[in-house]
Image: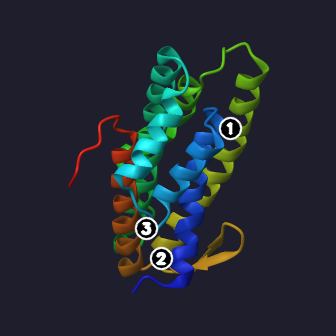
Amino acid sequence: MFTKTMKRFLFILLFSLTSFAQALDSTPEMERIIKQVMQTDGEINKELHDKFWREINTSSKENSDKYTKSMKLILIPAQEYQKELWKSALISYQNNTVVKTQRLMELDQQMSELFRKSLTYPPDSNEFKREAIAFEKGSARSKESAKKLLQAAANHKAFAELNGVEFYPDEDSINEILAKLQASFNRISKLMDRHWIEN
């Protein structure tokens, strides 16, 4: 059963992913749509999809192409990082010791460079430097939270982090979170595809 605490905990995780959209100079409407699609009980439909792409297409073709390339460059690996983290939590829980998947370790090394490549600002601009610094600070906090989550899973103890939300990462709850993450990421992948495809 997906409890209110689990829903709040997962909302915070997904909300942190939407910060990438802010760094990529999204319009307020684009950020709103991304958040709506990614939330745990989110939705994706043709109307939202078309509205999102109208926002992108209001800029020049060169800018819209650059933006969508940047979004895919960072958002998909960020989604994959979340999934690999929770897969690692499940394995850690089952083995009573901290275990990271190979892919999680690779993403740990790659995220900073991918984020910098995704920024649409010139590398020598103040905006680029500001976003890069903010990412590094956020990344350090995220890595510390990930470490605590994996330790809690391995030790079968509660994990209190992210604005004081306490969460007990047992096998059932981790599997539910993985399922919710997968559904959310399927929706955002559909949103990122310029061409709408009915299910």
Residue 154's tag is none
Q: Amino acid at mark 2?
A: Pro
Q: Mark 1 or mark 2, which is nearer the start of the sequence?
A: 1
Residue 91 found in image quarter: bottom left
**Residue drawn 54% across and 27% down?**
58
Helix or strand or loop: what does disc 3 sit on? Answer: loop
Q: Mark 3 or mark 2, which is nearer the start of the sequence?
A: 3
Residue 129 found in image quarter: top right
Q: Which residue is mark 2?
A: 169
**Residue drawn 37% across and 65% down?**
178
Q: Amino acid at mark 3?
A: Thr
Q: Is residue 9 left or right of residue 178?
A: right
Q: Quadrant of the N terminus?
A: bottom left
Q: Alpha-carbon distance for marks 3 and 1?
A: 28 Å
Q: Alpha-carbon distance for marks 2 and 3?
A: 13 Å
Helix or strand or loop: what does disc 1 sit on? Answer: helix
| Nearer to me, 61 or 114 | 61
Q: Which residue is mark 3?
A: 97
| Nearer to me, 3 or 96 | 3
Relative image position of residue 32 (x, y in whole percent) = 59, 52
| Nearer to me, 101 or 52 | 52
Q: Is residue 147 among the parts visible in the rendering?
A: no
Q: Which residue is mark 1?
A: 136
Whether label 3 touches label 1, CB < 8 Å? no
Helix or strand or loop: what does disc 2 sit on? Answer: loop
Mark 3 burial class by Cα count in 10 Å: few <14, some 14-19, many 20+? some
Q: Amino acid at mark 1?
A: Glu
Q: Mark 1 or mark 3, which is nearer the start of the sequence?
A: 3
Q: Alpha-carbon distance for marks 2 and 1?
A: 27 Å
Residue 13 found in image quarter: bottom right
**Residue drawn 34% across and 61% down?**
183
Relative image position of residue 46 (x, y in whole percent) = 35, 50
